[in-house]
Image: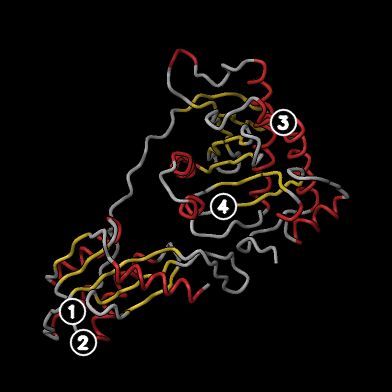
Amino acid sequence: MMNTLHKKQPDLEAWEGLYRAALAFRNLKPWEWMQEENVFGVRNPANGEIGYCVITGALGEHFSLGVYLGEGGLQGYEKMASGELEAFEAVLSLDCLMASFEGKDSLESEDLQVIKDLGLRFRGPSSWPLFRRYEPGYLAWFLNEEEAFFLRLALEQAREVAMRCRKNPQSLVPPNKKEGILVRTPHPHGNRYAWHDEWVQPPPPSLEPAFNGIFNELRAQKIRNLNLKPGGTWEIGFFLAPIPIQEGDEKPFYPCVSLIVDHKSGRVLGVDVSHLSSHREKFQELFLKTAEENNGLPREIRVPSEEALQQLQPVADRMSIKIKMSENLDQLEQAMEALLDSLL
């Protein structure tokens, strides 16, 4: 089912406009002279957000326009392009709209039905338009009406920018030797938009904020009152499972799995499966729940990452438990692999 988080789906007229823009973009073949580093922007008239556009295909594969949404979208793209993230992590960091040109086998039945309803025909590899919304933590999904509208505008403006670059390769170089990204910005003009150029300072790289979630002090005090004697070491971490989960007709998401494993025996003491957006709170909750159920606390906590350390530091401090990062958490890794194998 082509569910888009209960937002209105594009009607046939909207699909027709999007396909028309995509085919004009494809037929121009802008990847023959545009490089991925030729980033430019298109401002969304609906909310003022900039979609940072990247044209791919210069290497003869994956012909597409990616529209990375806002500063977070652009920074996610830059992490992916730099190779900072592994393949699965890179996909999960994307926040963008994508128009790509694929073989027929890459399309779902919903895509093929729209193409049939529009009376369109395609043949051969890299000729079938495919439109998807990438959102951190979610499976790539179908567009809703608002997304289809903005992607059409982005394709139209990307074609305009690409034609300029073909005539003048310096057209994306900011004037007066200042830093900046060319952004196509709309102004209402009757039933249409009049577009003009503006130069926008590229957003600075942002640091991941420290976790400042609500700590369940009452729950922690209850556990402290039990006067449990700490003993042993717990290995605690989380990972994103590459197996999407769908609840009802909601958009499928990749679950975040949190694990607590005894360092000596390898026994799994606690496990939780949650959405990426809520796992931080549940990560703390899992520790408190595991302490209650096992009627015990660890003497030491070992975690595999800075993010896990940030999330559990408040718990460890209040419980007077030593916590540290460690690169070699064999028991945790084995438990994660076993759980992933069982899911697969």
Q: Nearer the viewer, mark 4 or mark 1?
A: 1
Q: Earlier in the sequence, mark 4 or mark 3?
A: 3
Q: Earlier in the sequence, mark 4 or mark 2?
A: 4
Q: List x then y, in percent, for residue 267.
A: 30, 81
State the image coordinates of residue 155 (x, y, percent, origin top left): 68, 37
Disc number for residue 129: none
- Look at label 2 and name its amino acid: Asn
Dots 3 and 1: beta carbons under 8 Å?
no
Q: Quadrant of residue 223 in the image?
A: bottom left
Say left or right for 76 vs 335: right
* Above or below: residue 14 compared with residue 269: above
Q: Earlier in the sequence, mark 4 or mark 1?
A: 4
101 to 11, vertically: above or below: above
Residue located beneath label 4 in the image: 134
Q: Secondary structure at mark 2?
A: loop
Query: Residue at horizontal 36%, vertical 66%?
Result: 238
In this view, 12 is above or below 321: above
Q: Residues within 10 Å of mark 3 (few under 14, many from 20)?
A: some
Total labels drawn = 4
Q: Who comes first in sequence, dot 3 or dot 1?
A: 3
Question: What amino acid is found at the position of numbered circle 3 in the picture?
Answer: Lys
Which residue is identified by label 3?
A: 29
Q: Residues within 10 Å of mark 1 (few under 14, many from 20)?
A: many
**Residue hosting label 2:** 295
* Disc nearer the start of the sequence (3/2): 3
